[in-house]
Amino acid sequence: MEALISHNLNLEAKVSKQQHAEPISVSDVNVLLDSKIVIAGQNSSDLLYMKTMLEISGFSNIAATNNVEGVMQFLRAGIKDDICDIDLVVLDSNLSDMSAREIRAVLDNFDEWRLIPIISLTQESQWDHAQVLTDLGYGVTSLLYHPMTAESFPPSVMTALAVKKERDLVYQYQNKLEDELATLKVMEARLQYSVEHDDLTGLANRRRLEQALDLSLTQARNFGVNSALFYIDLDRFKVLNDAEGHEAGDALLLQVANTLRSFFSVNDTLVRIGSDEFAVLINNTESNHALSRAEELRCLFDGYSYEYHGHEYHLSASVGVQLITGEDTVTPGDILAHANQACYTAKKRGRNRIHLYSELDREMHTLRHTVQWAPRIRAALKQENFLLEFQPIHSIDSGKVNHYECLLRMKDEDGAVYYPNDFIPVAEAMGLIHQIDLWVVDHAVDVMRTLPKDISIAINLSGNIFLDHNLYPLVEKKFAQTGIDPSRIVFEITETSAISNFEETKEMVIRLRALGCRFALDDFGAGFNSYSYLKHFPVDILKIDGGFITELDSDPVDQLLVKSMIDIAHSLGKKTVAEFVERQSTMDLLVSYGVDYIQGYLIGKPQNKLPSI
């Protein structure tokens, strides 16, 4: 620890020395002259004058704009890899849309812009002590007064850029110090974690496994001695852990550890990775023998019995296998990751099985897709990159469009627009769907303010949102703020989502209907329990699943089913909507059946804007 403290002090002294001002060189001046400068003012002649003075003085990278929005566009465009290439902003006080100190406040909210200096130009020709205190107090770097001269303006710009350079260096050195200190803390933690065995089972831990893997790789590459790594995950261990508690789970893990000790040789490296996951490294083995051994291991746990307090549990295990050969150019970490991925694939394909790692495993492609999409969804939520589109729904009774379905889209940073099938499954898997649902409700209700009072909007919701306690207060608040009629909102929920949490969903639906909202059961008929749940689920509208509609005019079975759905819905006092209507012949059949609403490309495609009041 004394050595660590001494090293920290040396680092701080080193950074302090680096931060000490050094004489400026010719190359430093050239760097400053190449700095990117943005000048802004309403008077084009003033801008031209400033730009000319700077260019005569040797500055070569100058951008000009007549308004603050132009400044913000340059700032946004200048960001790359979390760094902004704008080095200085010069603002004339004649800009009416935002003052220099207000822009300073905006810049201070973002790490990419925080260190950018601002020079404020004022029309006042006399010293104003109050103005100086106000502007400089709000973080404006310096003040200049009209009329500007070649003796005052370029030197002030050079000084501000030099200060910016020094601030950048200080910031870099601080980050470097923090990174090195963080690395030292990790090293300290590893030193403290000196024990190479698992506390619970007494087996070797992951660190010991990585050392053994490194040695196995060396033997495979230098001596042609092949090995295999098994990654073992107990199936449904969480059921026992949750039902009986961690004490019962720990007792089972001890029993499993002893079983594995008896099954494998003392020359094999047996470790506990964590929780209910184990691994074993078998040296000097070929692929056929390794797979045969893995199957024997699976059979060992097939129907594995464990009794706790009179309750008997039957377990199994999924085993992932990764072969280690001299041809591989992998690291110990890669081998462990591949074995883990093979185990994940085995579990995804039904559990209680073995699987040899392959780069072509579709399960891993799906998992990587999820991992890649999650940050994009978070960014879209943060940057307001979700969009709403609206598809018209035609009323048979009135003969016109009287409500629209609200459809969600996501715009990526590159401007591409994605549909729900691309990101909703990932959002559901990563726990982001609630935030998306609340965003849709919030923005869709705001859209209602701009629509005629006889127009309604249908909003799609995920099933789990009805378990979120934030939904009801948000809806209640939005109605109070906007003053719109709650009956103009139709919340759509799929039959599958309603069934998954039936009682909780039903309770929330009842509360929202009490506010005046209406509900539609989407994709009706797609599930096996459609009519059973319809009897008890409080909805106002049934949206017949599009699978029954697309070939309705040519499929007698679909015709019979759709007609029966419409008849039953009407007998229960509910309206019906037919989706995916693309042909007039289909619409004519639906009208003859008594359907209430028609939706599909025949009526209209989703659109960005709706008719305003």
Image: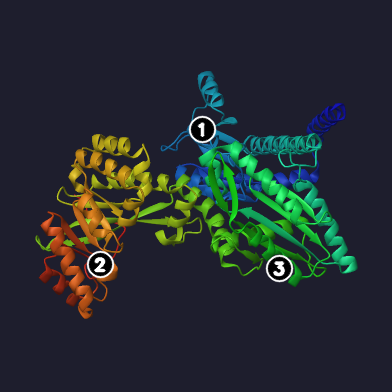
Task: Assess disc 2: are there few (<14), some (14-19) or many (≥20) residues with their C-alpha within 10 Å of its C-alpha.
Answer: many
| Residue pointed to by mark 1 | 105
Q: Nearer the viewer, mark 2 or mark 3?
A: 3
Q: Are marks 2 and 3 in contact (CB under 8 Å)?
A: no
The percent coordinates of residue 283 (x first, y second) are 82, 61
Quadrant containing the N terminus is: top right
The percent coordinates of residue 221 (x first, y second) are 86, 66
Farthest residue, direction bottom: 554
Q: Is residue 596 visible?
A: no
Residue at screen point 66% across, 55% down:
232
Q: Nearer the viewer, mark 1 or mark 2?
A: 2
The percent coordinates of residue 369 (x first, y second) are 54, 60
| Residue pointed to by mark 3 | 291
Q: Secondary structure at mark 2?
A: loop
| Residue pointed to by mark 2 | 600
Task: Assess disc 3: are there few (<14), some (14-19) or many (≥20) residues with their C-alpha within 10 Å of its C-alpha.
Answer: many
The amino acid at mark 1 is Ala
In front: 175, or 376? 376
Q: Is residue 70 visible?
A: yes
Q: Is residue 603 above or below residue 34?
A: below
The amino acid at mark 3 is Leu
Q: Is residue 233 above or below residue 360?
A: above
Q: Are marks 3 and 1 in contact (CB under 8 Å)?
A: no
Distance of label 1 from label 2 (alpha carbons): 48 Å
The amino acid at mark 2 is Gly
